[in-house]
Image: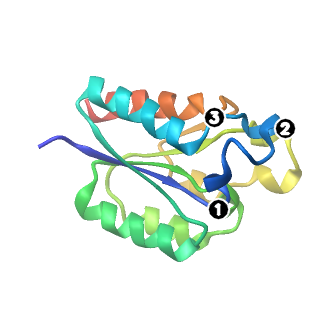
Amino acid sequence: MTPMIYILNGPNLNLLGRRQPEIYGRETLDDVAAACAAIGAEAGLEIRLLQSNWEGQIVDWIHEAREAAAGIIINPAALTHTSVAVLDALNTFEGPVIEVHISQVHRREAFRHHSYVSHRADAVMAGFGVHGYALAMRHMAHLLG
């Protein structure tokens, strides 16, 4: 059975490519999905890319991943800085977790410098644009050996 990687995306990432392109670029979440699927195919991994503007939905998908996924790549977006619930859910997941941020969060507003998710993440990609997802996929393949 091919290992499954959940790629979870938080609030406003449904607008990727249209929202603040000077910060987040012009590529869409569909572009991210295509790039990750191609890398997954090379590495023998399947992906399930999901996006929600609702914290509870992200938590439910993390719970689902406990049974269905070998690893999680997560861009929690604004939930990064606010959600203990997402952190608690990730703490129940036994596989590797990679946190992704499109922008270089440490060059932005001070409130973006703190991440609850980083307390659980095995790696953090920030400032690589959407290419950070591809880097995360390659690192996930490495972690899963």
Q: Which residue is mark 3?
A: 27
Disc 2, SS: helix
Q: Position of residue 123 (x, y in %)?
A: 51, 39
**Residue 107 badge:** 2
Q: Secondary structure at mark 3?
A: loop
Label located before the other in sequence (2 or 1): 1
- Tell me the CA gap for discs 2 and 1: 20 Å
What residue type is disc 2 on? Arg
Residue 17 location (% of width, % of height): 68, 41
Where residue 130 sits: x, y (%)?
Answer: 61, 34
- Disc 1 marks which residue? 11
Residue at 45 percent of width and 30 percent of height: 35
Q: Quadrant of the N terminus?
A: top left
State left or right for residue 29 relative to residue 34. Answer: right
Identify the residue at image location x=51%, y=42%: 30
Q: Residue furthest top?
A: 42
